Image (cartoon, coloured by chain):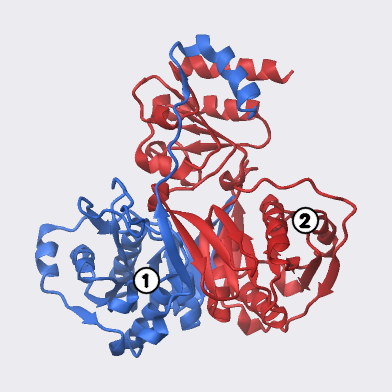
Chain colours: A red, B blue
Amino acid sequence: MTKDIWVFAEHKEGKIKKVTFELLTKGCEMAIRSKGELAAVLVGHNVSNLVDELAYYGAKKVYVIDDSKLEDYTSDVYAKVISELIKTYQPATFLTGTTSIGRDFTPKLAVKLDAGIVSDVTDLNCDSEGKITVTRPIYAGKAFSKIKFECFPQIVVVRNNIIKPKEPDTSKLAEVINYSVNIEDSDIKFNLKEVKLSAGETIELTEADIICSAGRGLKNAENLYLINDLAKAMGNNAAVGASRAIVDAGWIDYSHQVGQTGKVVSPTLYVAVGISGAIQHLAGMSSSKIVAAINIDPDAPIFKVADYGIVGDAFKVIPALIEEIKKAKL
Amino acid sequence: MNIVVCVKQTPNTEAKIVVTPDKKDIEKDNLKYIISTYDEIAVEEGLRLREKFGGIVTLVTVGTDKSQEALRQALAMGADKAIQIWDESLEKADSSVIAKVLSKAIQDIGYDVILCGQKAIDTGAGIVGSMLSEHLNIPQVCLITQLEYIDENTFLAHRQIDGGEEIIEINKPFLLTAQKGLNDPRYPTLPNIMKAKKKELKKLSLSDIGLTSENVVPKVQILELSMPPEKKAGIIFKNGENDVPEFVRLLREEAKVI
């Protein structure tokens, strides 16, 4: 077993996902501490052009598993090829983000390697031996748990948007190690028939820097345009979220729901409009760095967790807010 | 069709959680317990499969005797029988232990379809279901929002992914984890609540499923629990749209988020 720290380099449509850079940034810190080497693992088809950026964020090596059978993600095959890679090179630690891929194959990987695994991690550190301690929320963020690994390898699925990526250093290079695994047709246990992407969705809620979230205070579905306009005014990295109440009322799709039975988000800025702040909603957004709230009710519980708030009529405040933001950006 | 549903009893979502002074646990005195929300959705899907194809719905849980309440609730929804597995050495079980224990118990039952919630609402790890599919060497589709069938053996599972969904064709046996939106769980009717009291609830020990305490050593250990940091009071303006300029100024210059 080495003390090496590996980061799963997730990519989509020819670009490395931001969470990979977040993990490499943390990985750099931990590699210094444990004196292990930081590497990235790149899996897919025709992906070797993505290696450079991984080096800029600190990867000293990039293990590349490139195969046409890896073009579309399947949990069984990804878990299989990565477990073989890990068995060969014996890193101490394997980090992924909380994405539909990262969270999906890692439990299978853990069983194949008989490894420990912890998910939804909001803080992690290692000691000089490379042993990792993590912090993760429990009871929907109403408490936190500090957990340590008892054995190697250590698989950690980290929450997105928690770590700030460092500045890339474009002078850095990484050694590329190509690895091939024999993938049988029988390794693929199901048939992926279709992938449907939601129309007009550019930012995944769990990866957004800014979220403008709507609640029942907006009165009806037609008024959601206010939130859409606010998000647009905030910039390209702003997404629209929703309380359970408006999802249940059918105003907006469930994929926008933030909360204990929805998505858990950690944006830099969370703007809650017409959301009272029920405990289950807070569970989904309490790790936002800054919370802003607009609500007509001065006693709304959301104001207890807001850094900045305005008590007022959303139908007057939001248009004024949009104007002011546009002015400020000029 | 042999349908197995894994359930967990958890505190309900309104629960006020307080960490004990020794930081090892939470105060449990005033907690109300439920079937974990996503597991309830899994139970409902199991019942619908039985309604379509016939067969048996068996519940499985790893938990103390208290978890029998949750099993009876799921039996009252309409499940046919239940299995509870417990041993003192499972007190500190992590996800890998729970998955191993469930896989041993389920192997003995026989299964066509295994349903789990996508994650438990207390620990929220979302790992056990997927590990279970690996132990049993069957395909998994996690976070399903819809399940259609082509015939009794072939199904189309809609899996929620970042930004959309995948539609996946799978053949029995397989494991699915349920996401919100898959269905609306039924309320137990009074006659079913009465019937549930008489339905079979078997309690198994580790040795009943071929394991010893040496097989259930966790790979991760909880060092301590803590409460979230106290949040300092925010700046709350009271004059509606008149305060917008100052509000935006603070967000820009103080918080630096715009």
From the top left corner, tell me how far across and down residue A288 is, in percent.
Answer: 53, 39
Q: Secondary structure at mark 1?
A: loop
Q: Residue at x 48, y 41 (%)?
A: A285
The residue closer to the viewer here, B31 or A205, is: B31
Residue A249 in the image: above or below residue B57:
above
Give me the chain letter of mark 1: B
Residue at 48%, 55% in the rendered image: A136
Mark 1 sits on what residue?
B92
Q: Which residue sits furthest top? A: B242
Local crowd at mark 2 within 10 Å, few (<14), some, or many (≥20)? few
Query: Within 10 angstroms of label 1, few (less than 14), some, or many (20 or more) residues?
Result: few
Which numbered dot is residue B149? Answer: none
- Is A53 located above or below residue A202 in the figure? below
The answer to which of B33 and A72 lies nearer the viewer is B33
Q: CA distance from mark 2 to mark 1?
A: 43 Å
Whole-percent x, y for residue B188 in the image: 18, 58
Residue type, numbered disc 2: Gly
Pointer 2 residue: A14
Q: Which of the 4 quarters of the picture holds residue A34?
A: bottom right
Q: Amino acid at mark 1?
A: Lys
Coordinates of residue B29 in the picture (x, y in percent): 20, 53
Residue B80 left/right relative to A325: left
Numbered-mark total: 2
Where residue A269 appears, x then y in whole percent?
57, 34
Q: Chain of mark 2?
A: A
Tell me if I can see residue B149 in this picture.
no
Q: Secondary structure at mark 2?
A: loop
Is residue A84 at least partly visible in the picture? Answer: yes
Q: Is residue A241 above or below residue B248?
A: below
In the image, taking residue B156 as reference, residue B84 lies left or right, namely left
Q: Is residue B170 left or right of residue B24?
A: right
